[in-house]
Structures are given as structure tokens and as C-alpha cells.
Image (cartoon, coloured by chain):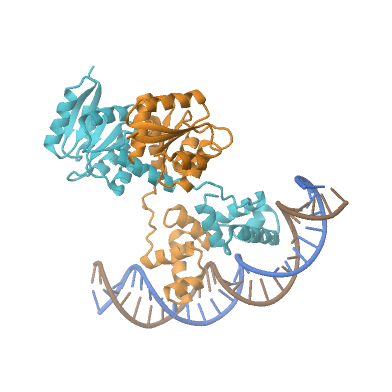
Chain colours: A orange, B cyan, C blue, D brown
Amino acid sequence: MNGIKVAIFDDNDSLRDSIAMLLSDTKDFSICGSYAHCLHVTNDINKCNPDVVVMDIDMPGINGIEGVKIIREKFPYLQILMFTVFDNDEKVFAAIKAGAGGYILKNASSQQLLAAISEVYNGGAPMTPGIARKVLQQFKNILPEETKDNYDLSHREKEVLGLLVDGLSYKMIASKLEITYDTVRAHMKKIYEKLHVSSMTEAVAKAINRKLFS
Amino acid sequence: MNGIKVAIFDDNDSLRDSIAMLLSDTKDFSICGSYAHCLHVTNDINKCNPDVVVMDIDMPGINGIEGVKIIREKFPYLQILMFTVFDNDEKVFAAIKAGAGGYILKNASSQQLLAAISEVYNGGAPMTPGIARKVLQQFKNILPEETKDNYDLSHREKEVLGLLVDGLSYKMIASKLEITYDTVRAHMKKIYEKLHVSSMTEAVAKAINRKLFS
DNA sequence: AAAGCTATTACCAAATTCGGTAGTTGTTTG
DNA sequence: CAAACAACTACCGAATTTGGTAATAGCTTT
């Protein structure tokens, strides 16, 4: 057949044509749509029904990241490969957050682009080495800290603190745990002591920031 | 010269030998150390002084992830490539958190292994497609929510909420902002309304979780 | 068996928070 | 100019939180 069907969104006409040409020359890929902007992205995709979308970022009207968001909402399983000149953290992370499945830079070779389209179609996450490193670095940073700070809370105390973080009052916690209001208070006192705080807000803030909850 | 110097840690003797053989056959790589465990990892690395470490996970005594942590502490700039059979989230994320610069599975081809060593050495982050997808997926999930949820807080309200998150009481906030206690209350009422909450704890939890503060 | 820890309940008094209502002032916007 | 909004102040009553002290029961460790 015509292989992986690709749709391109990029405001650079000649680049779009080059890619279309490239894809047409292979037997594993085919081009099913080529658009200069994302203004009618939903319609466009409905019409050409691609397997993979190649998406630029800098486009007039709706930028590529917004475009990805729109596509994600309407076509949750469609794979999207970002193909752009931007390699700054902000754009990269925004694209991933929006739901892009891969991110390669425009200085990549034709072969790399084809390989990336194929990879993203097959459930991989192709990235330019530098991009991959950025992602890994950032990922490492925001990965939940090991809860070395257990603060030695007992099981019950954690339970109470958890409910507190969920916004429950003493009374509600008592009801939920089927214990007395005064028991909840006793636990809270212990928790305050162990966390070195003296109010609900401080306890909640510390619990969340120390990744104990939520 | 002898190209990229590689040290291998893997308890499978024959696999280690295969890799050593493979590396010796190329001009771009050389093997400088081959070890069955991480028990003397610091010494080992000091002796052979590699550019890249290829690290298995399942090893007796000290596992590969612990090994990575040790290496990271002593040799912050040494690149480490995980090379293992494990493709479960827990191991993958733990390895990244520990400081691995790449993660490929043992079912990869020789060529892919060589490419990965080269890539990790050159500042990339080689990953098996499935691993990359896992990372991207998880990354997407824990990436800070877009602050689309600004909740339209006014400048003053943000200020008040910020102090609340820091654990201050109404009275303390009033004092800090040099306004009346009742004014603080007025702001709080607005904040509650905008955040759709009705207690300090809920406000704090929402503020932190929505990345509005701290 | 004594000591230590966890979970539980209880009461008091002071401090703090919450919801509602109401008003002034100054700035921005249609 | 009128309307809308942000910042500010004020009071009331009810609900909630906080700190202190005290006690019982079960379970584990020494």
C-alpha cells in the first residue's frame, strides 16, 4: 500500500514541498496532506486521515503547540512529531505537555526525519540527542524525591495528614476515620510536633512540598 | 587513538566478553575495564578512567542503580549508559533519577549499542524507543500544569495567598502587608471564591498543586 | 514485668477562621 | 459620565483550630 500516511503543518511552502517530495519517493511513506497553518486543523485531519502529523511550531494564527493541543483533544491516538528550529526548554516542554510524541530539529537529515516518523508511528519517542538530554535532565530534576523525609509519621498520622491535605476539617476527618474529634486533635498535635509546624496551612504546605502527599 | 574508553559492569561473564570483543574490533571504541559487580566501583573507575560506563542493573551485592548513584557522587561528569533487560517503569525512572545518561535494553543490536555509547558520550540521551516513550509519557504527566489556571487572582490576592502558603495567619499577613485584619479577610473571601474552596488548607493545597506558589 | 510507643478519648480556655452584609476610595473602561 | 473593578475597612455570630493537661488500652521491646 501507501505506507504511513503523513500530514504536514508548516508555514514554509518550499520546506513542505521538499518533505512531500521526500515522502513520495519512498514506498514506506506517503503524504496525505500539506498545510501552511493550523487554522482548520480539525477539518484538515478529518479529510486526509493521516497516521502521523509532522508539526512546525512557528506558524501564523495558531502556533504548532496550540495545534497539538487541538489535535490531542479530537484525535487522542494520532501521533504527532514536532519538527522545528526551536531547541529551547520552554518550547520543547510545552510541546511534550501538549501531547507531542516526538521532537526533532530541522537540522536533522532526511533519513533522520524518515526514521523519526517511522519511530513515532511505532510507539517510540524520537528526539534529537540534545533534546533527549534536556528532557532527561529535566525529568530527573522533577522526578519525585525519595521520601527520605518521612518525618517518622505513624501510619495513622499519615492518614490524618493526607485527609488534611485534601481539605478536610478535624470534624470531617474524625467522621471519615470513624474516630473522635479529640483523637484527631491528638494526632494533629503529634503531626505538628514531628513536622515542626503549628498550623494546618503549614502542615499542608510542608506535606505537599516534601512530596508526602498529592 | 583508542577512541571512547568504555568500562562495563555486568555479572554475565560471556556477555561482558562479547561486548569487550565488539568494542575491540572498532577503531572508535576501546574497552578499559570489565567488572562483574559494583563492589569496588570507585576503585575500578579510578584505575581504568573510562569515558563511558555501561551498567547492568541486576548484579549481586550492589545493584546497578546503586552503582550509578555512587559513580555520580564521585565522578559527576562521567557518562553512564544503562544496559539491561528491565523495561519496567520503576527501574527505568530510578536509573534516570540516579543519574544515568541513557537507557537501552539488552535486546538491542550491536550497532545500536555502539551508537548509544557514542551518543551518550556526545551529550545525547540514547533510549530504546519504548523506554523513550515511557519517559516522555511520565514526563508529560508530571510536567507542571500550565498556569492557564491563573484563577484571575489580582496582584494583591496573589500576595496574600503567597503568604498563606508560607504558613502565616490572617493577623500575620495583615501585619506583614501593613493592612487591616479585615482587609486580609476580604481578600481571602475573594480568593476562596475564585479558587472554589472554603478553607485555608484547601487554598494552600490548590495553590501549591497548581504551581501557583512554592 | 517494666518501659516505650501508638491509638484512643476527654475537657478547658484562648485564638483564629468563616460567611454575610455594608461601605469608602481611586482607577480603568466603555 | 456611569459602570466596573481593585483595594481597603468594619462588625456580627457561628464554627473551627490550637495548646495544655490527663488518662486508658494494646502491643512491642528489653
- Closer to the camera in the image, B17 or A189: B17
Q: Nearer the viewer, residue B130 or A47?
A: A47
Q: Is residue A12 left or right of residue B173?
A: left
Q: In this rendering, would B187 be left or right of A131?
A: right
In the rendered image, residue A27, in percent from the top left (x then y), is placed at: 32, 29
- Kindly indicate the quadrant of the structure image that contains residue C7: bottom left
Q: Residue at x 17, y 30 (%)?
A: B19
Quadrant containing the N terminus of chain A is top left
The vertical placement of A212 against B87, above or below, is below
Farthest residue, direction front: A1
Along the line of sight, the residue nearer the viewer: B91 or B64: B91
Q: Residue furthest top?
A: B1
Seen at 31% across and 41% down, the residue is B131
In this rendering, would A102 be left or right of B83? Answer: right
Picture residue at 66% right of the left edge, 61% below the top? B185
Q: Is residue A70 visible?
A: yes
Q: Nearer the viewer, residue A112 or D5?
A: A112
Q: How many marks?
A: 0
Q: The C terminus of chain A appears in which quarter of the rendering?
A: bottom left
* A75 over B122 or under it: above or below: below
Which corner quadrant of the image does residue A141 belong to?
top left
Instruction: Mark yes or no: residue B123 visible.
Output: no
Horizontal and vertical percent position of residue B90: 30, 49
Whole-percent x and y of residue B88? 28, 48
Q: List x then y, in percent, for residue A80.
A: 42, 39
* Residue at horizontal 39 percent and vertical 58 percent from the top: A151
